[in-house]
Image (cartoon, grey):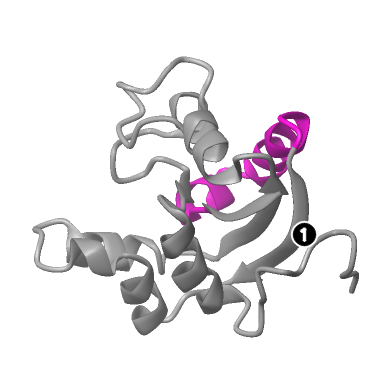
Amino acid sequence: MEQTLLIIKPDAYKRKLVGKIITRIEREGFDIIRIALKSLTEEEAEILYEVHRGKDFFEPLILFMREAPVVALVVEGKDAVGRLREIVGKTNPDEAASDTIRALYGTSTGRNAVHAAESKEAFEMEVRVFFPDFKTTDSTDIFYS
């Protein structure tokens, strides 16, 4: 089983979409093995979006990610990274397939409801923002809190 990270962004949190998004993730067969509600610091938001540093949307994105809390989920399932990214959809909700999370709940490219780690390596870095002691060997079979 593979693990990955999903972040429910401030726009979805403020519009009370957390439950709908979690229900969708579970309906798709993923197990949620960690969940956290967190208000990001500027440094934490920058870690998550370091790949975009220097782009004109970087600073607005960092400010947006600090507008309200985010909900972070570590999910587990077969081909979790690839499958979750398919379910999430393209960055621009207008270009995303109609049944994806971003098409259903995103309102713009900047406010697209969710973030999904783009690779196993990205997951391993991003998960530390929310769960500093997380080990990729953790799973629903061996961890309960």
Task: Look at the numbered disc 1 and give the secondary structure of its residue.
Answer: strand
**Is 39 situated left or right of 95 in this image?**
right
The residue depicted at 28 percent of the width and 38 percent of the height is: 109
In-front residue for pair 82/94 = 82
Q: Which residue is mark 1?
A: 33
Q: Main secondary structure of the magenta part?
A: helix
Establish if 123 lies above or below 97. Answer: below
Establish if 67 lies above or below 30. Answer: below
Question: On the image, which quarter does residue 65 sit in?
Answer: bottom left
Magenta range:
8-29
Question: On the image, which quarter does residue 27 sit in?
Answer: top right
User: Percent x, y for residue 97?
Assistant: 42, 17
The residue depicted at 67 percent of the width and 76 percent of the height is: 135
**Is 121 situated left or right of 95 in this image?**
right
Quadrant in which the C terminus is drawn: bottom right
- How packed mark 1 is, by other alpha carbons closer than 10 Å (few <14, some 14-19, many 20 or more), is some
The residue depicted at 17 percent of the width and 68 percent of the height is: 53
The amino acid type of the residue labelled 1 equals Ile
The residue depicted at 48 percent of the width and 49 percent of the height is: 116
User: Percent x, y for residue 5?
Assistant: 56, 56
Q: For the view shown, which residue lies furthest in the top direction?
A: 98
User: Percent x, y for residue 35?
Assistant: 71, 63
Magenta stretch contains residue 13: yes
Question: On the image, which quarter does residue 77 sit in?
Answer: top right
